[in-house]
Amino acid sequence: MFAFQLQQHGILPSQQKGMCGGQRYRVSTAVGDGLFHAQKRLYVAASSFGTIKPKLSYRGIRHAAQSIVLPDGMSTQKVDVLSGLEGRAPPPPPISKSDEEFLENGIEFIWGVKDLSVDELNALFEKVGFPRRDPGRLATALANTHTTVWVRAARKSRLAKEGQLLGFGRATSDGSLSATIWDVAVAPQWQRGGIGRGLVERLTAHLVDQGIPTVTLYAEPGVVGLYEKLGFVKDPMAVKGLAFQSKSDRGKELVASLTPGRS
């Protein structure tokens, strides 16, 4: 499903109706060199399931541990944390379990998309409750992903056959200023074994080592605590992520109004 991000901070005007999750908004949209005022009511949702996914930003283990996060998601040390890191990347997270240690347990981390099956990846997504993606679009997304790391069974066991996909994670990025981690998933029978943590540690460390100063992710609510332990801070800039669903009736109406030659 096609979606593009709207950020509440600075994008949605004062006429907004409600906060998020199926509520209606009036928006002003900039098109080309002119300002096109689309006085439309849009249905905006945090996700296709109506679940609000908190946005987290990597600030390093030390800074995350020192920050006190209030119920509204604001960090009491936001200014100190951000001013100390402005213009440079925080230190990468330590890798808590090496590739060699995982391999001893029959688990292998693989970088890149070579040998990664789109059908098997879709099956993994379904197992963890993620939406199944169109195979062609998913293949295109993978080809255009900045960094991909996945996990397979290095040997046959009672839980998996050799080469079976056990976990996955990827990051999109401009390669310079920012990156976002997406689609972290671990097969249910292999969860709580450190694979998910290993995926996020490796992705984050790789991005930070490239000098990318801003690394963010949208977390499932139940695993926010894990990411905070890895050096992520919940919503440090007080920006909420919103997704515009173009397949809704209101979305189709706006898309049509923005198409040249159509009103």
Image (spheres, rainbow, N blue to C red):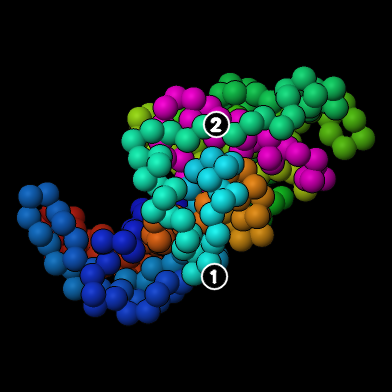
- Asked whether 152 or 98 is in front, the reply is 98
Badge 1 amino acid? Pro
User: Which residue has dot 2 on it?
Assistant: 92
* Residue shown at 64% from the left, 31% from the top: 94
Badge 2 amino acid? Pro
Residue 1 numbered mark, or none:
none
Q: Residue furthest right?
A: 158
Name which of mark 1 and mark 2 comes first in the sequence: 1
User: Which residue has dot 1 on it?
Assistant: 71
Q: Is residue 254 above or below residue 189?
A: below
Q: Is residue 243 above or below residue 86?
A: below
Q: Which residues are magenta?
A: 189-217
> Quadrant location of the C terminus?
bottom left
* Residue shown at 74% from the left, 29% from the top: 97
Give the left or right position of residue 41, taking residue 105 as reference.
Answer: left
- Asked whether 115 or 78 is in front, the reply is 78
- Real-space Cα distance between discs 1 and 2? 27 Å
Q: Is residue 150 above or below residue 219?
A: above
Q: Is residue 247 magenta?
A: no
Measuring from the top left, give residue 48's x and y in whole percent: 50, 62
Q: In which quadrant of the rendered view does residue 246 lie?
A: bottom left
Q: Is residue 127 above or below residue 85?
A: below
Q: Secondary structure at mark 2?
A: loop
Measuring from the top left, give residue 126's x and y in whole percent: 67, 50
